[in-house]
Image: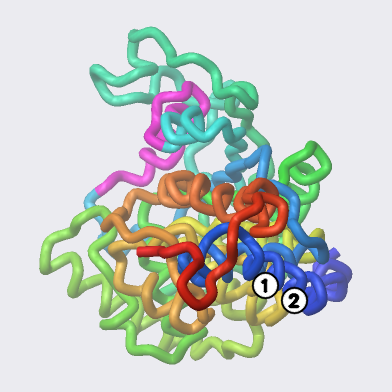
Amino acid sequence: MLENTIAAIGPLDESAMRAARERQSRLTKPVGSLGALEELAVRLAGLAGDCPPPLPEPAAVAIFAGDHGVHAQQVTPWPQEVTAQMIGNFLAGGAVVNAFARQAGASVTVVDVGVATPLAGGVPADPAPEGATGAGLPRPRAEKAGPPRLVAANVRPGTRDMTVTAALTRDEARSAVEIGARVADDLIDGGARILLTGDMGIGNTTPSAALIAAFTGVDPAETTGRGTGVDDATYDRKVSVVRAALSRHRPDPTDPLGTLAAVGGLEHAALAGLILAAAARRTPVLLDGVIAVSAALAAAAFAPAAVGAMVAGHCSAEPGARVALRHLGLDPLIDLGLRLGEGTGALLALPVVTGAVRVLHEVATFDSAGVAEKGPGNGVEGT
């Protein structure tokens, strides 16, 4: 499946991009006045092979969840059980991602690709913090796209400690990649016109930092951040842990499957698969934060043309995110200092993507509106 997916990924359609640029030049606005939105719309036309491209509606968020053996190295103060508890919160509709998804009208799919704590009855009971939705309070209204759903696809109960041995075998990494691809196909077959990446996994910023360092060659001190807000001692330990894992395994960035197996997480591998399958289906993927962009580096290593399907939703406060986005050549749509994950930043950026495409669909041309184009003594002034 992986090889077939990669083989189906092609470059952006140049003729559709030319048509989009030409249409942008005839719309009732000064050329370039919408800044980055204009080039975004052009790229999406190239991805779709059509101008205007389809509106990115409906949207689907896929949250891949997994645990990490490197948690044993005390890289985070949060207990590993929180991963499973937050899955319960997602399914109950009480997390930030749910609030933003309701606002955007996006569906939420949670995929257990490697959670260590068993999900009794499919979801832990009453998981939300005291006083939060799901802990005895009324649940919020269901998303327009329906309530969140859980996909059980656990490859193994968390990765191994990457400072001791490879986090995954190659077969386990491949299984996770292909699970992500199947989820993408399922969502697209179900009508989704844009996919948004989400993630959940206590400790997952540590393998993210390792992946970014491995694929970009940047020193771990520059790719490692404070995650959930760790203190100086924990941060220093994180950097040392990342450095030790890279020194042990020496992952080859031209071997993305081997790199994912050595220092990645099951959610990273699944996210890479989601991106690859979306690119093969010429469907845009709106990337969230540092976990998503570290997975995007793996997807780009598998198939460089997959970058054409990627849209950087926001720039995470994690320093590795900027390193990864720079390597991918992607500019984030928004920068609000977010570092939550779950898909929250991608959801906040979704209206920006929709607006960029809607301009090509709905804004009149100078001819059709009877508006004079710019010329000596006339034209439309912009600011």
Q: List the residue tagged with mark 2.
A: 18
Neighbor class of circle 1 (other Cα within 10 Å; few <14, some 14-19, many 20+) is: many
Residue 235 lies, in percent from the top left, at 19, 69
Q: Which mark is residue 59?
A: none
Give yes or no for residue 87 being in the magenta stretch.
yes
Q: Quadrant of the C terminus?
A: bottom left
Left or right: 287 with respect to 17? left
Residue 289 lies, in percent from the top left, at 42, 59
Task: Write down the region rendered in magenta.
Answer: 78-96
Using the rendered view, name the quadrant where residue 268 is placed.
bottom right
Task: Residue at 36% x, 57% y: name it.
Answer: 203
Task: Residue at 50% x, 66% y: name it.
Answer: 379
Using the rendered view, name the quadrant where residue 26 is placed.
bottom right
Left or right: 15 with respect to 204? right
Comparing 161 with 50, the one in front is 50
Residue 121 lies, in percent from the top left, at 58, 21
- Seen in the picture, residue 86 relative to 283 is either above or below; the reply is above
Left or right: 300 with respect to 209? right
Comparing 238 with 147, the one in front is 147
Residue 269 seen in render: no
Query: Residue lying farthest left?
Result: 232
Alpha carbon of mark 2 to alpha carbon of mark 1: how far? Answer: 5 Å
Q: Is label 2 in a helix, a strand or a loop?
A: helix
- Seen in the picture, residue 95 relative to 44 is either above or below; the reply is above
Q: Which mark is residue 21?
A: 1
- Colour scheme in the image? rainbow
- Seen in the picture, residue 89 relative to 14 is either above or below; the reply is above
Q: Quadrant of the N terminus?
A: bottom right
